[in-house]
């Protein structure tokens, strides 16, 4: 995973995500003795290989069979399934207490975003279960500086929608899927070009400081949402 290789900007963001996920699961454990976990769009297994050590059971779902095989090699005991949960005929394989869906929402087509969130909502065990997902292209961040470039390049096409998502859009999709968002955490306040000019330890401290600062975190290019059934 070159994008998340040690010392890269992706690695810095992944450190912040790991810490936040650990804190959220520790908090969740306070009211749930057993945690059955699902990672949607598991990809290479980056998220599930970390979280499986913090939960009781872990399942990953990935539509690509090639990625399913790759993720299977990344985990210890988690089960990786290859299926399309957005297809109407796909059976419900289980119910879960804690679900993650990272780097999916922004990349998916609008209709697929809603279908996926609806499918994930159907897999939450009850209204105390959590769905944690992120938007890695929040509009009101340093990414806004690139808006004019994409606006000119798109020439009336839908390219912009694949690169930016506002809180309003995310909340609307979640609401239509039967979910309510309880909390938001922002991170990735500074661009990779800025952060990577600094020594690795200073870059990590800078991004962690920004992520922990309420005002600065609101400007993060990545936003993490904690949602539950309405």
Image: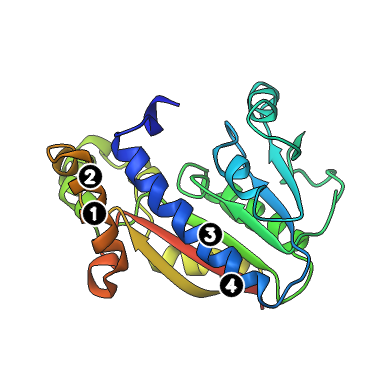
Q: Tell me the tag on residue 201.
A: 2
**In the picture, which quadrant includes the C terminus?**
bottom right
| Residue neighbourhood size for the residue with mark 2, other residues' Cα within 10 Å, grouped as few (<14), some (14–19), many (≥20) | few
The quarter of the image holding the N terminus is: top left
Report if the CB atoms under discs 1 and 2 are less than 8 Å apart.
yes
Percent of width and height locating residue 61: 71, 40
Residue 205 in percent (x, y) is at 23, 54
**Residue 33 showing in the rendered view:** yes
The residue tagged 1 is 205
Using the rendered view, name the quadrant where residue 45 is placed: top right
Residue annotated with mark 3 = 22
Q: What separation in Å lies between label 2 and label 4 (alpha carbons)?
A: 28 Å
Q: Residues within 10 Å of mark 3 (few under 14, many from 20)?
A: some
Left or right, residue 94 beside residue 86: right
Number of residues whose C-alpha sits closer than 10 Å to that of mark 1, classed few (under 14), some (14–19) or many (20 or more): few
- Circle number at residue 27: 4
Q: CA distance from mark 1 to mark 2?
A: 6 Å
216 sits to left or right of 18: left
Callout 2: helix, strand or loop?
Answer: helix
Q: Quadrant of residue 216?
A: bottom left
At 20% from the left and 51% from the top, the residue drawn is 190
In front: mark 2 or mark 4? 2
Answer whether residue 179 is visible to the viewer in this image: no
Q: Is residue 166 above or below residue 89?
A: below
């Amino acid at each position: 995973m070159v994008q998340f290789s040690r010392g890269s900007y992706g690695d810095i963001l992944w450190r912040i995500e790991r810490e936040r996920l650990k804190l959220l699961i520790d908090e969740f454990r306070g009211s749930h003795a057993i945690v059955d976990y699902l990672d949607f769009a598991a990809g290479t297994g980056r998220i599930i290989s970390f979280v499986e050590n913090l939960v009781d059971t872990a399942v990953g779902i990935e539509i690509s069979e090639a990625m399913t095989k790759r993720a299977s090699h990344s985990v210890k005991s988690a089960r990786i399934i290859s299926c399309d949960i957005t297809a109407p005929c796909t059976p419900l394989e289980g119910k879960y207490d804690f679900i993650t869906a990272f780097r999916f929402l922004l990349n998916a087509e609008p209709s697929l975003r809603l279908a996926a969130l609806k499918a994930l909502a159907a897999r939450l065990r009850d209204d105390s279960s959590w769905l944690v997902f992120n938007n890695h292209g929040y509009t009101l961040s340093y990414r806004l500086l690139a808006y004019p470039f994409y606006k000119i390049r798109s020439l009336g096409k839908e390219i912009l929608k694949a690169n930016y998502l506002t809180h309003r859009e995310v909340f609307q999709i979640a609401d239509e899927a039967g979910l309510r968002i309880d909390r938001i955490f922002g991170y990735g306040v500074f661009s990779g070009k800025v952060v990577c000019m600094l020594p690795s330890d200073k870059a990590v401290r800078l991004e962690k400081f920004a992520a922990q600062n309420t005002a600065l975190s609101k400007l993060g290019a990545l936003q993490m949402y904690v949602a539950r059934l309405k």
